[in-house]
Amino acid sequence: MWMIEVPPFIPFFVGALIAAFTRGTLRNVAMLAVPLLSALHLSMVPTGAHLQFDFLEYQLVPYYVDKLSLMFAYVFHIAALIAIIYSLHVRDTLQQVAAMLYAGSGLGAVFAGDLLTLFVFWELLALTSVFLIWARRTQRSYQAGMHYLIIQVLSGVILLVGALFYVAEHDTLEFGYIGLNSVAGWLIFIAFGIKCAFPMAHNWLTNAYPEATVTGTVFLSAFTTKVAVYALARGYPGTELLVYIGAAMTCFPIFFAVIENDLRRVLAYSLINQVGFMVVGIGIGTALAINGAVSHAFNDVIFKGLLFMSMGAVLKMTGRINGSDLGGLYKTMPKTTVLCIVGAASISAFPLFSGFVSKSMVMSAALENGFDGIWLMLLFASAGVFHHAGIKIPYFAFFAHDSGIRAKDPPTNMLVAMSIAAFLCIVIGIYPEALYSLLPYDTGYNPYDATHVLAQTQLLFFSALAFVWLNLRGLYPPELRSVNLDADWIYRRLAPKAIHSLFAAIWRVDGAIRQQCLVWIELCLNYLSRRFNGGSGLLSATRPVGSMAMWITVLLALYLLLSFIR
Amino acid sequence: MKNDKLSNKKRALFDNRKNVTRVLIALYGICALLLILDFFIHRHISHSWENLFGFYPLYGFVGCVILVKVATWMRTFLMRPEDYYDNECKEQIENGNGNNNRS
């Protein structure tokens, strides 16, 4: 059937073209139609479908379908549809076109069957999404976008170099299991890791996402990191190093999230925390763990999107996003409040909400495979994510002290988008079999047994109790207008300062050496002129120029004479 | 953005301290209930610590208190003024051509 051979990124790129040349209702209809039609098409694509052609002696597979890529493609379609509905009110062609291209690039990347195609979509993801940050049109968003673009392009370049090494080593470009036993493996691993926001390489995310536009952040949160998770799941399943990296990712951001004031940056930190759970799952690499990682990625796109949408609604309606400026919004934004709480309950993995059915798989897999320490870290991170994303976000935005802001609920399209996401969070939480049937492996896992439910509920309610206790005792850190230093300080402040002082030192030494040389030359000249003082010496300073010119003429004449002799 | 009509209307749900107290009492009640359930529900455990009475409640509570304490302590050396990085950019622009002072 001809339709099978249309890779899903093509409808999105065509949609971007249409969005560029249409306005108003027509554009809205076209943009809504793209993910719907493409999803319909996708539901008919069988696994194993692929396109391939030869390029410079290598076989390229720009489109390859299996259960893993389909899973990500499904959730990318859901995310694109929700985010498009959320941004229907936006009258900014730049953003609409960039968003469509960005979603298409994400889909292209998850269906890439070879490393060269992956590289192309990898870079396209960066180039298209940066406009969603710049579209805010502030000095800060410009700088954050630049930072984002540099890091992302760097990741792409490393991927390309890794792919070239891979070809040299294996004589094929096929994107399958790569592993860490070669130079190419490490290079590609680093490239994936940068996009996956590994610790120390994570600041592009926490800087850029809070500076993007209200609607742009919703798109951003769905695609980039999940493409990286997909790539790791395909290239590095069962790589033990990932377990430790992932565990670090789940734990360190929650400390920053607790003291962060910008609520969208709090969500950016919690995004890293959630990706950490997926990375741990991929690192463990058993069927249950991979299923857990993939389904958690699926759920995370939806509930993190919902949280970013609710905070976007707050930012749009009040013009503020700092916890220190907000509070008491539940009085006038009741719908947003409820929807935000659904997202918060999902990310906290409350039973009957989507996070629970996927996160528990990773936790179970960690225990089953003897990663006891890692399991304790994940448990701590679960309590922590409830603390900062589950309680802090809704509490400081909608409750806490009354800020006096009386903003209304956002426009209908934004509420509809949030409602769809909230609905999916609850449906997946109540009926996880629907999600499990899409997973790459069949493990017969059941999250709803008494042990899991009781353990998770106890953990969460006593975390809430800790929050209440700390708050009543006045021990909870107040929201303060501030910037908290993070790893990016190393290259934004420390490195420039170090380089600056290094060069200052080099110039000082250089200056001193030059000065010393001048002194020596002066001394030499003085010595020579003293030595030949009197004007009679051969090298005397008082010899006339005329005699010098004469001697040179004599020398040249001598040369001429010698050349004749030869 | 202020809408005086709304703010003068009836008091909102949590303006009444009693409602806040009710929510808190409900929370304490649920916590107590969950702790008691530990006696009745038989767990199939995979880690020996899970057998300890109140392991999960204690871990959740202590974990969160430590999290907040450490995070508060981190503020003492990580916190900077809100325009910390902005200043640097302005300095650079002023030191440079000074033509593109947009902000």
Image: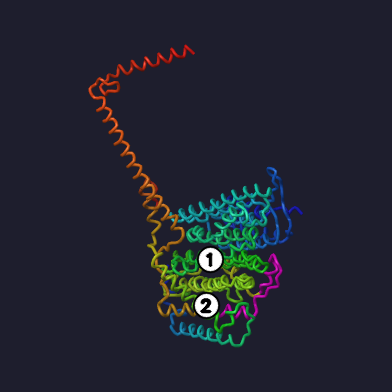
> On the image, numbered disc 2 is attached to which residue?
B60
Residue A142's spot in the image, x, y percent?
A: 46, 53
Q: Residue B10: x percent and y percent?
A: 44, 80
Quadrant in the picture for the N terminus of chain A? bottom right
Name the side, left or right, on which A289 lies relative to A267.
right
Q: Residue at x 68, y 49 (%)?
A: A172
A398 within the magenta span: no
User: Separation of disc 2 and disc 1 at Cα?
Assistant: 18 Å
Residue at image mark 1 = A248
- The relative height of residue A164 versus residue A552 in the rendered view (above or below) is below
Q: Chain of mark 2?
A: B
| Nearer to us in this view, A196 or A301 | A196
Crowdedness near tag 1: few (<14), some (14–19) or many (≥20) residues, C-alpha within 10 Å:
many
> What chain letter is assigned to the residue under label 1?
A
Please name the residue shown 67% across and 52% down the image.
A114
Q: Position of residue B6 (x, y in %)?
A: 44, 74
Residue A80, quarter of picture: bottom right
Q: Viewer-proximal residue, B36 or A91?
A: B36
| Residue type pointed to by label 2 | Gly
* Color style of the picture: rainbow
Residue A359 is marked as: none
Left or right position of A498 against A147: left
SS label for mark 2: helix
| Local secondary structure at mark 1 | helix
Q: Amino acid at mark 1?
A: Ala
User: Of all residues shown, which one is farthest toward the left?
Assistant: A534
Q: Is mark 2 in CB contact (under 8 Å) with mark 1?
A: no
Residue A213 visible in the shown view: no
Q: Which residues are magenta?
A: A431-459
